[in-house]
Image (tube, rainbow, N blue to C red):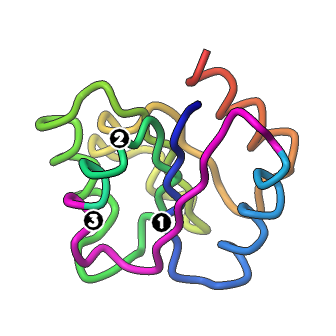
Amino acid sequence: MKNILIVEDDRSSSDYYKAILRDIKDYNIFSVDNTDNIFELIKSNNIDLIFLDLKILPINGFDVAKRIKVELPHIKIIAQTAYGHFQGEDKLEYFDIFLEKPIPITTILESIQSLLK
């Protein structure tokens, strides 16, 4: 069983991702709407993959990803944002996949499956 964490402050986006993933028996889905205590949550739930909004607060997605890749490099991170201009920045080295909203269901599923083989 793989553990996926959805980090998304927009409730409709979070509900969309949870609806897509809830019927897949191989995944446990966790969800938070901010980055308060996120590192403790990741460690205590043995998270395998994080679906991370870049504009989340209080710690933005770039800083969260950088720390995870330093402390827990085995965790896969999918960046998701409505701001595609981030794609060209060096900070993207901390993400395994970068997706721009709106994200089609097939893209979400294919991305997750490719990282959790």
Q: Nearer the viewer, residue 75 or 90?
A: 75
Q: Amino acid at mark 2?
A: Asn
Residue 91 image offset from top left, x and y in percent: 28, 45
Sequence order check: which comes first, mark 3 or mark 2?
3
Residue 7 bears which disc, if any?
A: 1
The residues tagged by marks 3 and 1 sit, at their Cα atoms, a distance apart of 9 Å
Whichever of labels 3 and 1 marks the residue nearer the N terminus, that label is: 1
SS under mark 3: helix
Residue at 42% over, 74% down: 55
Crowd class of label 1 (few under 14; some 14 to 19; many from 20; radius 10 Å): many
Disc nearest the viewer among 3 and 2:
2
Tags 3 and 1 in contact by the CB under 8 Å rule? yes
Image coordinates of residue 6 in percent, x first then y, are 54, 60
- Tell me the residue at 55%/66% (across/down): 83
Residue at point 24%, 28% (across, down): 73
Measure the C-alpha gap from mark 1 to mark 2.
15 Å
- Is residue 11 inside the magenta stretch? no
- Mark 2 — residue? 46
Say whether residue 7 is left or right of residue 59.
right
Q: Amino acid at mark 1?
A: Val
Provide residue 3's location: percent of width, then percent of height. Answer: 51, 42
Q: Which residue is mark 3?
A: 38
* Residue at the extreme top of the image, as rendered: 117
Instruction: Please give the range of residues in magenta.
Output: 24-40
The mark closer to the camera, 1 or 2, is 2
Magenta stretch encompasses residue 32: yes
Relative height, residue 26 to residue 23 (above, below): above
